[in-house]
Image: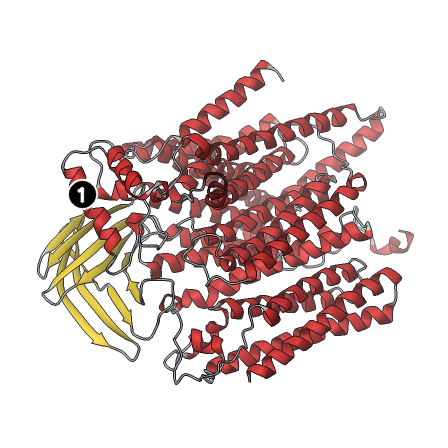
C-alpha cells in the first residue's frame, strides 16, 4: 500500500510541475487551450493528493504497520477519530495534509474564478502549484509518509496520549488551514506584481479568502489554547512557546492586512504596504511550519529533528527575497494616491493599528529567535519565556485594545469634535463608574485597573455605537428594535461582523487580564481525609482509585469541594500512565487529566501531581479568574468572522428619485 | 519636530519603560510559585518551573524544594535566582536579564515601534499637506447646495451601511 501512495504522490508532483509551467505559459501568451489544460492539471494534482491522503488514512484505519508512519502514530487500540487524526500527528503526515489543503484551496480558487475569466489567476495558479511542488518534493524525498519497514511490528506505538483530546481533532487542521490559506492572497499579490495589474483587483479577489484564513488561524490558536489548558495540566493556556508564537505572528500581521486593505480600497493608500504585509504573512506562515520541523528551537510542539530545516529556510529565503525584489522593481507603479484631511480620522487609527500589530509581531518574532541570536553572538542559548513576552507585549496589546474601539467609531477622512464627544461621553462615564466599582470592590493593582477600565471603555463604546445605529434605523424605518438590529446585521455584514469580532477581542482581553493578574495557586501533600484551602475553597481529599484499561493505567483522586463550608461537589483529577507509547513530548507517557470546576467568575483547577499506595497524594490547585471569557471571546471572534465572511446579497441599485409608473420610459 | 512632539515621544518612552519594569513584585512575602515563575525547569521540558506538570520530575522537585528552603531561611528572591544562574547558567532564567547584550531583546521592539511611528508621522505629514494643498475650484451657491444635500443623504446611508 505504501508503494501505491508514493507513486500517486510522484504523479501529483509531475502534474504540479506541468500545471505551474502551463499556467505561466498560458497566462503569458494568452493561450486559452493551454490555460484550460493547466487547470485540468491542477485538478489532477488535487485528485492525486486526495488519493494519497486516502491511502494513508486507509493504512491508519486498517493498522498497516508495514508503513513506518502508521506504526509510529497509531496502535490497535486507538479509536477511529484518533486514527484519522493520526494523519496530522506526525511530521510527514502533517506535511501531506499541508499539501492536500493547498491543492484543495488552489482547486477551489481556480474554479471559483474560472467563469469570471480572471487574468490574475494564471500567474497566481503558477505560484500555488510551485509551492505545491515544493511540498511534494519534501514528501517524496525527505519526509516520505509511505516509507515501509523491513520488519512488520504486531502493533504500533500509538498516538501521543496528549493528542488524544477532541481539541486535537480540530486544532491542527484549523491551524494548518490558516497557514496554507495565506498562500492564496500571497499568490494573487505576486501575480498582481508580475502582471502589473496593481489596482484593487487583487485585493477584491482575495479579501474573503484572507478573512476565512484569518478566521481559521484565529480559531486554531484559540482551540490550541483551550487544549493546552485542558490537557497539558500546568494551569495556563498560553506559554509563549515558539510554536504558539509561530501561530500568532501571521495572525497579527494578517489582522493588520485586513485593516489596511480597507484603506487601499477606500482611499487608494498603502499599496506598497499591503504587498509587504501579505508577503510577511505568508513568509511567517511558512516560518511556523519550519519551526516545528527544524529542531532549531526547543518547543513542546517540535517534531523529531529532520532534514527539512534547511529546505524550508531556503524556501522562505527565496519567497522573501524574490517577492520583496519584485516589489522593489514595481514600487513606482504602486505610488499612493493618498491625501488626508485630518489627523483625527479612521485612516490615522488604522495606521496606528498597523504599527502596533506589526510591532507586536516583530517583538514576538525577535523574542522567539533571540535564543539563536544569543547563541550565535555569545555562545549562550538563553531562554526567552513568558515573563519577557508579557512585559514587552502587554503595553502594545493594551494600545491595540484601545484602537479596537476607536477605529470603528471615528469616521473616514475627518471626525468632528462634536461627533467624538457624542460617541465617547457615555462610554467614558461608564468606564469611570466601572473603575470606581472595581476600586471599591478591592482591586488595587494599577496596571490591572487601567487594563479593565480601558477594556470596559472600548466595550461600552462599541455597544453604545451599535445601539445608536439600531436606534437610528428604528426611527427612520419605524421598525421595532429587534427587527432594526437584525436588519442592520443583514444589510452590512462586514461592518457588524467586525463589531462582533472586536467585542470578542475585548472579552478575550478581559479573560486574559483577569487570569493573568489574579490567579492564585497552592501545592499540598495530603493524606486521605485531610483538607487544603485556597481563597474561599476548601478541598478534602477523600479517596484514590486505580484501574487498568487496554492501553493505560489510570490513577484518580476524589476531592470534595466546599465553598465557605457549602459542598459544591466532587472533583476527580487523574494521571494516565500509558504503556505502549514512547514519544518525546513528555517523559515516558504520563498524561495529566485535570479536574476543573468552571464558572463565569473563575475556574477551580485541580492537578493530581502524584499519589502513592499509602493514601498520600500531592495536589496543585489553582483559582483562575475569568478564564471562561477567553473561550466566550473566541466564540464571538469566530461568529463575527463568519458574519463578515458570509456572502452579501446583491443590492439592487436604488434610483435617487423614485420613478413614477407613467413616466418610466422617460428615464 | 516641535518640542511638544518631542515631549510626547519622551513621555511615551518613559511610559513604555515603566510598564516594562512592572515585573512580578517579589517582596518579603514571595512564594515558591513567585520565584518558580522566573525560572525554567531543567528536565528538558522547556517549560517555566512552576508550569512543569511531569508526574515525577526530579529536577522540578529538587529546584522547588530548594527555593522553599531558601525562602524559609529568609533569602531574598533575587539571591535565590542568582544561585540558580550560578548553578545552571543563564538559560535557567525564564527571560533574558536586562543587561549587556540581552538588553537588545528588550529594547529592539521599542526601537522598531519608534522607527515605525517616525515613518507614519512623516507619511501623515506629507498626506496632510497633500490633502490641504490640492486645488479646489470655488463652488457656486447652487452647486454647494446640491452637494450639501447629497452629502447629507450619503452620511445617512453611511450610518446604516458602509464599512468597507
Percent position (x, y) of residue A144? 56, 72
Residue at far top of view: B3
Which one is in front, A387 or B82?
B82
Where does residue B139 sit, x and y in percent of width and height?
Answer: 84, 26
Q: Residue at x 51, y 80 (%)?
A: A148
Residue A585 image position (x, y, % from top left):
38, 62
Q: How many marks?
A: 1
Q: Quadrant of residue A265?
A: top right
The residue located at (22%, 64%) in the rendering is: A572
In the image: residue A38, left or right of residue A300: right
Residue lying furthest front: A379
Q: Which residue is mark 1?
A: B68
Residue, x 78% and y 38% (percent of image)? A335
Question: Is residue A13 toward the left or the right of residue A532 in the image?
Answer: right
Front one among B74 and B21? B74
Q: Secondary structure at mark 1?
A: helix
Q: Is A502 located above or below residue A162 in the figure?
A: above
Q: Is residue A521 above or below residue A173?
A: above
Pick the front one: B159 or A325: A325
User: Left or right of A450: which side holds A55?
Assistant: right
Relative to B94, is A66 on the left or the right?
right
The quarter of the picture where the N terminus of chain A appears is bottom right
Which of A496/B155 is in front? A496
User: Numbered disc 1: what chain?
Assistant: B
Amino acid at each position: 500500500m505504501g508503494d501505491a501512495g508514493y507513486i500517486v504522490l510522484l504523479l501529483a508532483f509531475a502534474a504540479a510541475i506541468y500545471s505551474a509551467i502551463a499556467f505561466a505559459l498560458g497566462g503569458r501568451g494568452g493561450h486559452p487551450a493551454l490555460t484550460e489544460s493547466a487547470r485540468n492539471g491542477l485538478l489532477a494534482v488535487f485528485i492525486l493528493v486526495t488519493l494519497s491522503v486516502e491511502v494513508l488514512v486507509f493504512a491508519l484505519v486498517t493498522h498497516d504497520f508495514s508503513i513506518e508512519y502508521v506504526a509510529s502514530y497509531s496502535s490497535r487500540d486507538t479509536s477511529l477519530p484518533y486514527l484519522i487524526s493520526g494523519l496530522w500527528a506526525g511530521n510527514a503526515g502533517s506535511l501531506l495534509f499541508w499539501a492536500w489543503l493547498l491543492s484543495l484551496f488552489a482547486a477551489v480558487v481556480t474554479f471559483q474564478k474560472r467563469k469570471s475569466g480572471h487574468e490574475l489567476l494564471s500567474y497566481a495558479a503558477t505560484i500555488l502549484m510551485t509551492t505545491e511542488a515544493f511540498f511534494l518534493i519534501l514528501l517524496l524525498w525527505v519526509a516520505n509518509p509511505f516509507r515501509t519497514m523491513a520488519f512488520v511490528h504486531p502493533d504500533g506505538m500509538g498516538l501521543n496520549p496528549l493528542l488524544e483530546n477532541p481539541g486535537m481533532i480540530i486544532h491542527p487542521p484549523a491551524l494548518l488551514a490558516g497557514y496554507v490559506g495565506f498562500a492564496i492572497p500571497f499568490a494573487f499579490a505576486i501575480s498582481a506584481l508580475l502582471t502589473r495589474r496593481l489596482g484593487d483587483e487583487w485585493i477584491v479577489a482575495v479579501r474573503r479568502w484572507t478573512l476565512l484564513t484569518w478566521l481559521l488561524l484565529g480559531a486554531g490558536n484559540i482551540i490550541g489554547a483551550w487544549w493546552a489548558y485542558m490537557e497539558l495540566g500546568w494551569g495556563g493556556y498560553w506559554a509563549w512557546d515558539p510554536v504558539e508564537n509561530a501561530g500568532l505572528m501571521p495572525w497579527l500581521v494578517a489582522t493588520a492586512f485586513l485593516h489596511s486593505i480597507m484603506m487601499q480600497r477606500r482611499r487608494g493608500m498603502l499599496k506598497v504596504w499591503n504587498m509587504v504585509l501579505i508577503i510577511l504573512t505568508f513568509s511567517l506562515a511558512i516560518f511556523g511550519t519550519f519551526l516545528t520541523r527544524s529542531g532549531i528551537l526547543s518547543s513542546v510542539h517540535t517534531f523529531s529533528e529532520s532534514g527539512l530545516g534547511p529546505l524550508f529556510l531556503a524556501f522562505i529565503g527565496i519567497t522573501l527575497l524574490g517577492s520583496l525584489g519584485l516589489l522593489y522593481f514595481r514600487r513606482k507603479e504602486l505610488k499612493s494616491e493618498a491625501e488626508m484631511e485630518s489627523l483625527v480620522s479612521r485612516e490615522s487609527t488604522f495606521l496606528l493599528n498597523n504599527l502596533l500589530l506589526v510591532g507586536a509581531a516583530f517583538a514576538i518574532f525577535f523574542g522567539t529567535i533571540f535564543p539563536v541570536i544569543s547563541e550565535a553572538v555569545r555562545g549562550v542559548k538563553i531562554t526567552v519565556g513568558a515573563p519577557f513576552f508579557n512585559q514587552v507585549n502587554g503595553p502594545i496589546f493594551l494600545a491595540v485594545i484601545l484602537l479596537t474601539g476607536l477605529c470603528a467609531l471615528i469616521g473616514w477622512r475627518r471626525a468632528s469634535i462634536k461627533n467624538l464627544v457624542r460617541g465617547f461621553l457615555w462610554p467614558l462615564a461608564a468606564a469611570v463608574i466601572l473603575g470606581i466599582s472595581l476600586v471599591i470592590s478591592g482591586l488595587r493593582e494599577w496596571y490591572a485597573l487601567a487594563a479593565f477600565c480601558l477594556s470596559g471603555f472600548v466595550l461600552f463604546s462599541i455597544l453604545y455605537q451599535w445601539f445608536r445605529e439600531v436606534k437610528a434605523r428604528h426611527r427612520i424605518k419605524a421598525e421595532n428594535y429587534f427587527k432594526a438590529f437584525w436588519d442592520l446585521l443583514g444589510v452590512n455584514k462586514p461592518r457588524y461582523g467586525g463589531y462582533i469580532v472586536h467585542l470578542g477581542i475585548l472579552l478575550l482581553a478581559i479573560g486574559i487580564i483577569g487570569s493573568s493578574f489574579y490567579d492564585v495557586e497552592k501545592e499540598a501533600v495530603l493524606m486521605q481525609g485531610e483538607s487544603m484551602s485556597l481563597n474561599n475553597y476548601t478541598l478534602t481529599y477523600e479517596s484514590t482509585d486505580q484501574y487498568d484499561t487496554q492501553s493505560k493505567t489510570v490513577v484518580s483522586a476524589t476531592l470534595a469541594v466546599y465553598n465557605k463550608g457549602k459542598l459544591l461537589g466532587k472533583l476527580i483529577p487523574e494521571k494516565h500512565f500509558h504503556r505502549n507509547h514512547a514519544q518525546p513530548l513528555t517523559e515516558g507517557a504520563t498524561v495529566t487529566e485535570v479536574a476543573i470546576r468552571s464558572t463565569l467568575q473563575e475556574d477551580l483547577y485541580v492537578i493530581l501531581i502524584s499519589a502513592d499506595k499509602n493514601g498520600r497524594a500531592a495536589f496543585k490547585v489553582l483559582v483562575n479568574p475569568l478564564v471562561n471569557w477567553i473561550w466566550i471571546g473566541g466564540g464571538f471572534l469566530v461568529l463575527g468572522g463568519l458574519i463578515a465572511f458570509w456572502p452579501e446579497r446583491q443590492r439592487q441599485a436604488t434610483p435617487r428619485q423614485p420613478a413614477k409608473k407613467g413616466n418610466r420610459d422617460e428615464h | 519636530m516641535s518640542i511638544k512632539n518631542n515631549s510626547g515621544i519622551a513621555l511615551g518612552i518613559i511610559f513604555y519603560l515603566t510598564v516594562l519594569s512592572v515585573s512580578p513584585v517579589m517582596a518579603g512575602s514571595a512564594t515558591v510559585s513567585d520565584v518558580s515563575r522566573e525560572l525554567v525547569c531543567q528536565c528538558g521540558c522547556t517549560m517555566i518551573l512552576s508550569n512543569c506538570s511531569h508526574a515525577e520530575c526530579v529536577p522540578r522537585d529538587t529546584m522547588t524544594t530548594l527555593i522553599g528552603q531558601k525562602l524559609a531561611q529568609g533569602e531574598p528572591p533575587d539571591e535565590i535566582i542568582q544561585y540558580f544562574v550560578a548553578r545552571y547558567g543563564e538559560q535557567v532564567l525564564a527571560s533574558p536579564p536586562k543587561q549587556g547584550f540581552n538588553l537588545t531583546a528588550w529594547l529592539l521592539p521599542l526601537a522598531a515601534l519608534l522607527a515605525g511611528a517616525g515613518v507614519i508621522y512623516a507619511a501623515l505629514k506629507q498626506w496632510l499637506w497633500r490633502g490641504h494643498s490640492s486645488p479646489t475650484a470655488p463652488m457656486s451657491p447652487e452647486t454647494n447646495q446640491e452637494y450639501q444635500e447629497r452629502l447629507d443623504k450619503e452620511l445617512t446611508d453611511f450610518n446604516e451601511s458602509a464599512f468597507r
